[in-house]
Image (cartoon, grey):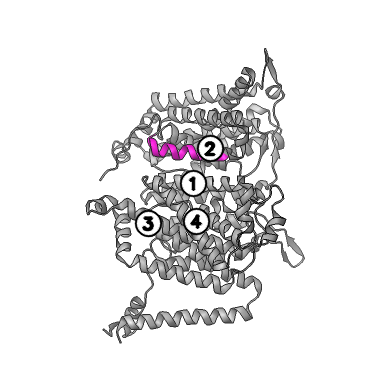
């Protein structure tokens, strides 16, 4: 069989399997487990988008939380009903176009992504002239500025009080649907000529420039696409946890996404997915160290902050002892699998 | 605004600026040598304030002794961070060290949250430091004079070490070319540890004085001063000690004066520094006093 057709069939089978699992999960798993599954999908979207920016184009961006905030706020403003908005803005009333706007969930998520991409583009034009650490610091600065602005434009964002009661449309199907779309889109880009240019810029920008590539233009495109999916991820996350406030989108959030990407392997998409599964489950599982524990008649009180202590220790260990992450820059592909196991790989 | 008010704001600005400056020096030294943004530096600042708190409140030490012990202890912490998290990554891509730095920063913050709890603590301010003195119509805290004086004395001491002693010479040599310096027989790791120690000591001193000026301390108090001090270091020209101090001063001045003249902007206070950072990076990435770093091809 032609390996191309074979791979397509296997991909369809895998998606069907995922669908079957979600269908089963929706009926048999409890609310908490479903929430974790949802978080895995959202984190995977965020990790894939950061990996496109950092792992494939080599731009060290620490601005993800800012784009997520934009996506989350735009989407939430579109799906909250006018009645809810009138109730919620207690400090200052919500101003006109935002008070009556309402849109279906799909439109709101796309809008969140587009606005994030637009802001990403505006940020990219000045900032992407920088490289290396400076780019990281500048993007982090922009994320922080976005957060301060959101805190202060109370008539639109309800300021530091945040938004509550966002409709929880983002169920398993929406999240995994967006996840698959993100994955498909980014895989197509990475394997296209565009992707080759991105990788050339990552590996050696000066060499890429000398080949006649307009590296700035490609960097801006990669950054904006990444910002779009970060916005989408933020929009889904807002609807998933139904409450957002400016404090939530601090540097810690960017750090979590960065850690997923690094754990999975920079420049490996399957690594990012694997990383989001591992880190999300780990972060949830680590909640037990913060809960009170009873062993026999002893009661150990919960220790707030312990979870992040263990988490940051683990991450330091990863960086010190397995810098390239789980996958390195390798991908997990059907061809690779068949080459390794059995004769399937030699069918061509 | 009246002249008196202006002078009071000026004193506030100088105090804040010298505190930023002291922290910025640590960033600039480490960046000058290792090209690494030491994200954990702001947390050393926080540790300084906490050690001071425990020295004075828990162990009832006199103010001065507690401060010296706190500075020494934080300095040891800084060296320890380098030993554990940065030294193994000397030959790794710089980004790995940066991620490690962010990891250490979160580790220190959350470990402090576990050990010291998240409750804000109240630092004891020595009576004479907070008794307002009046000169003519101008009312200022003695602290607003003490802090800049101590800060500038410390910086002069540091400049003496860097420009007049052998280890200082080695430090400057490493920042030019680490490999050649190693070949000349300098034990590079020790000198880098010294740079971390000195930088951390200054950060801790800044943290202690910060706690005297703004007496509520909590485990995340170092995050924003840390970011802003880094911006001050970039502003002044990264790698330059004098530049870091000047950058800190100017940043303090900008923050205080914008709020003083435009009180309606106070909600945006934390954004000023970041806006400044982006403007500098775009206009003059080498900062006010920085040397041009050429990318080697």
Give the residue number, with chain letter if any, for mark 2. B272
Q: Position of residue A199 (x, y in %)?
A: 32, 59
Q: Quadrant of the C terminus of chain A?
A: bottom left
Our reading of the magenta stretch's main secondary structure is helix
Q: Residues within 10 Å of mark 2 (few under 14, many from 20)?
A: many
Query: Do marks 2 and 3 share a chain?
Result: no
Foreground of the two, A244 or B240 = A244
In 3D space, how far apart are the residues under numbered discs 4 and 3 (Cα atoms)? 15 Å
In 3D space, how far apart are the residues under numbered discs 1 and 2 (Cα atoms)? 11 Å
> Taking the image as drawn, is residue B68 in sight?
yes
Residue at (44, 36) in percent of width and height: B234
Q: Nearer the viewer, mark 1 or mark 3?
A: 3
Give the residue number, with chain letter if any, for mark 3. A221
Secondary structure beneath dot 1 equals helix
| Circle 4 chain | A
Q: Nearer the viewer, mark 4 or mark 3?
A: 4
Query: Do marks 2 and 4 share a chain?
Result: no
- Tell me, yes or no, whether the two marked residues, 2 and 4, touch with CB atoms within 8 Å: no
| Circle 1 chain | A
Foreground of the two, A221 or A332 = A221
- Tell me, yes or no, whether the two marked residues, 1 and 2, touch with CB atoms within 8 Å: no
As drawn, is B236 to the left or to the right of A201?
Answer: right
Q: Which mark is residue A115?
A: 4
Give the image quarter of residue A311: bottom right
Give the image quarter of residue B214: top right
Q: Position of residue A137 (x, y in %)?
A: 45, 45
User: Residue at the left extreme?
Assistant: A211
Q: Which mark is residue A65?
A: none
Give the residue number, with chain letter if any, for mark 1. A142
User: Residue at the bottom extreme?
Assistant: A1
Instruction: Please provide the residue range marked out in magenta.
Output: B270-286
């Amino acid at each position: 069989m032609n390996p191309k057709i074979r791979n397509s069939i296997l991909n369809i089978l895998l998606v069907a399997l995922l669908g079957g699992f979600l269908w089963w999960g929706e009926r048999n798993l409890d609310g908490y487990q479903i929430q974790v599954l949802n978080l895995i999908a959202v984190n995977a979207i965020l990790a894939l988008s950061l990996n496109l920016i950092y792992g494939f184009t080599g731009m060290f961006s620490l601005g993800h939380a800012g784009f997520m905030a934009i996506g989350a706020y735009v989407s939430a403003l579109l799906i909250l009903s006018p009645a809810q908005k009138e109730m919620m803005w207690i400090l200052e009333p919500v101003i006109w176009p935002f008070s009556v706007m309402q849109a279906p969930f799909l439109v709101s998520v796309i809008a969140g992504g587009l606005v994030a991409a637009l802001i990403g583009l505006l940020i990219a034009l000045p900032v992407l002239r920088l490289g290396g650490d400076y780019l990281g610091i500048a993007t982090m600065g922009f994320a922080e500025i976005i957060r301060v602005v959101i805190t202060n434009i109370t008539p639109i964002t309800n300021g530091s009080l945040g938004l509550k009661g966002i409709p929880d449309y983002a169920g398993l199907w929406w999240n995994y649907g967006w996840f698959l779309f993100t994955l498909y889109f980014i895989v197509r880009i990475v394997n296209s000529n565009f992707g080759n240019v991105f990788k050339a810029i990552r590996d050696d920008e000066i060499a890429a420039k000398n080949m006649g590539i307009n590296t700035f233009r490609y960097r801006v495109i990669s950054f904006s696409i990444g910002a779009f999916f970060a916005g989408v991820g933020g929009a889904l996350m807002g609807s998933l946890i139904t409450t957002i406030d400016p404090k939530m989108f601090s540097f810690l959030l960017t750090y979590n996404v960065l850690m997923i990407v690094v754990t999975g392997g920079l420049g490996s998409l399957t690594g990012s997915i694997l990383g989001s599964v591992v880190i999300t489950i780990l972060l949830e599982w680590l909640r037990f160290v913060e809960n009170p524990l009873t062993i026999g008649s002893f009661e150990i009180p919960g220790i707030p902050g312990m979870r992040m202590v263990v988490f940051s220790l683990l991450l330091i260990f990863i960086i010190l002892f397995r810098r390239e992450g789980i996958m390195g820059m390798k991908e997990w592909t059907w061809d690779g699998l068949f080459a390794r196991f059995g004769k399937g790989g030699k069918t061509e | 605004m009246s002249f008196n008010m202006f002078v009071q704001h000026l004193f506030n600005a100088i105090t804040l600026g010298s505190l930023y400056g002291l922290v910025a020096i640590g960033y600039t030294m480490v960046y000058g040598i290792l090209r690494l943004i030491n994200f954990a530096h702001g947390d050393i600042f926080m540790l300084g304030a906490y050690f001071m708190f425990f020295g004075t409140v828990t162990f009832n030490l006199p103010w001065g002794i507690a401060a010296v012990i706190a500075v020494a202890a934080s300095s040891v912490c800084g060296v320890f961070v380098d030993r554990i998290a940065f030294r193994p990554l000397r030959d790794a891509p710089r980004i790995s060290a940066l991620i490690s730095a962010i990891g250490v920063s979160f580790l220190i913050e959350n470990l402090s949250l576990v050990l010291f709890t998240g409750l804000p603590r109240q630092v004891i301010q020595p009576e004479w430091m907070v008794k307002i003195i009046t000169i003519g119509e101008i009312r200022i805290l003695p602290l607003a004079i003490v802090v800049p004086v101590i800060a500038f004395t410390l910086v002069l001491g540091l400049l003496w070490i860097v420009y007049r002693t052998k280890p200082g010479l080695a430090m400057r040599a490493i920042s030019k070319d680490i490999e050649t310096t190693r070949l000349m027989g300098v034990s590079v790791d020790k000198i880098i540890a010294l740079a971390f120690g000195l930088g951390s000591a200054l950060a801790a001193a800044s943290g202690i004085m910060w706690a005297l000026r703004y007496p509520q301390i909590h485990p995340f108090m170092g995050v924003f001063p840390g970011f802003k001090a880094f911006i001050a270091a970039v502003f002044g020209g990264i790698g330059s000690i004098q530049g870091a101090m000047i950058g800190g001063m100017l940043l303090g001045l900008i923050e205080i004066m914008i709020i003083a003249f435009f009180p309606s902007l106070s909600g945006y206070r934390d954004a000023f520094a970041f806006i400044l950072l982006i403007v500098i990076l775009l206009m003059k990435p080498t900062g006010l006093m920085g040397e041009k770093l050429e990318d080697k091809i």
